[in-house]
């Protein structure tokens, strides 16, 4: 029987590399007759205010896979909000951060709606559809499609603790609610770690399995050495939630005993946050 794979994600799949989505696409795509990937594109630099009030969609075909790049309403340029907030001082910065993050609930809702609409048009209705949705907003879009009879099965890929990216207590509560709702209504939830999976332990209807991302550290024996000197390397998005500041604080305690200890940070970083990390 012919079947199709639908992937929905808020990661800019064509603008990023080496994420779980890329490996899932590479491994699953050959098993299906038709593959559609619907993703939220990062807000482009220099985006004008009027463009924030419209949805934009671009269809891109790469071999046997069709990508649908969705730029939903209220999708500002990447980092623009953080830059705006970091440019303020004291209580104003905290108030702005909480207020704008709370407004992000509307952006989340508009993202769900845009992904649902585009995904509905992206699939063929004459064959069964398996949908893998990455993150809670994509999962809610997938569940809506299943409720409308468009999608046969939905898998929620629980790839991260979404409230951890948020400042506003209101938005954290909203995100946790959406995560639990996605887990309770998806046919299957794949959590990338045990601690993530544990938060759904009391959620009725949640069918959760562990599907790790990365390597199993228990399979590798630690190697003690004196040369070369210890060198910590961080690779990824450099932001307030990345843990860089905690590493710097820990290094202050280690340096008296390990004076050659070094840290290299590699990854995209907004200028305002970079200035905050600069050596004093």
Image (spheres, helix red, strand yellow):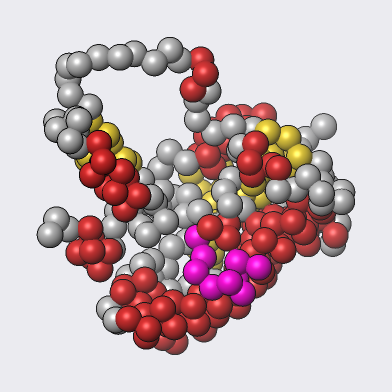
Q: How many marks?
A: 0
Could you say where residue 171 lies in the image, as x and y percent from the top left? Answer: 60, 71
- Left or right: 77 as drawn, with respect to 159: left
Residue depicted at 66% across the width and 50% down the height: 133
* Quadrant occupied by the N terminus: top right
For the magenta stretch, what is the residue range?
165-173
Could you say where residue 43 lies in the image, as x and y percent from the top left? Answer: 42, 68
Does the stretch in magenta take in 192? no
Q: Nearer the viewer, residue 25 or 190?
A: 190
- Left or right: 245 as drawn, with respect to 32: left
**Magenta stretch mostly in which secondary structure?**
helix
Depicted 65 relative to depicted 10: above or below: above
Could you say where residue 185 lies in the image, as x and y percent from the top left? Answer: 82, 53
* Quadrant occupied by the C terminus: bottom left
Residue depicted at 44% across the width and 87% down the height: 50
Residue depicted at 84% across the width and 62% down the height: 148
Depicted 108 relative to depicted 254: above or below: below
Q: Nearer the viewer, residue 58 or 50?
A: 50
Q: Nearer the viewer, residue 151 or 154?
A: 154
- Left or right: 100 as drawn, with respect to 133: left
Q: Is residue 36 visible?
A: no
- Left or right: 69 as drawn, with respect to 259: right
Depicted 49 relative to depicted 243: above or below: below
């Amino acid at each position: 029987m012919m079947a199709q794979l639908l992937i929905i994600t808020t990661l800019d799949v064509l603008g990023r590399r080496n994420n779980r989505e890329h490996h899932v696409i590479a491994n699953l795509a050959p098993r299906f007759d038709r593959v559609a990937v619907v993703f939220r594109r990062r807000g482009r630099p220099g985006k004008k205010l009027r463009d924030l009030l419209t949805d934009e969609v671009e269809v891109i075909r790469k071999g046997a896979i069709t990508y649908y790049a969705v730029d939903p309403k209220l999708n500002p340029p990447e980092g623009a909000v953080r830059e705006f907030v970091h440019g303020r001082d004291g209580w104003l910065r905290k108030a702005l951060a909480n207020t704008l993050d709370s407004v992000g609930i509307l952006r989340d809702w508009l993202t769900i709606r845009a992904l649902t609409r585009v995904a509905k048009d992206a699939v063929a209705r004459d064959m069964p559809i398996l949908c893998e949705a990455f993150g809670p907003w994509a999962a809610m879009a997938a569940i809506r499609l299943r409720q409308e009879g468009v999608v046969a099965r939905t898998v929620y890929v629980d790839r991260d603790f979404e409230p951890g990216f948020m400042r506003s207590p209101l938005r954290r509560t909203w995100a946790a609610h959406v995560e639990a709702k996605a887990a309770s209504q998806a046919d299957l939830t794949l959590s990338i770690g045990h601690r993530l999976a544990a938060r759904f332990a009391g959620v009725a209807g949640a069918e959760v399995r562990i599907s790790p991302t990365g390597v199993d550290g228990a399979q590798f024996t630690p190697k003690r050495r004196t040369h070369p000197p210890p060198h910590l390397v961080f690779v990824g998005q450099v932001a307030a939630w990345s843990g860089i500041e905690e590493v710097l604080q820990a290094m202050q305690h280690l340096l008296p005993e390990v004076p050659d200890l070094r840290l290299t940070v590699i990854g995209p970083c907004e200028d305002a946050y970079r200035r905050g990390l600069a050596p004093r």
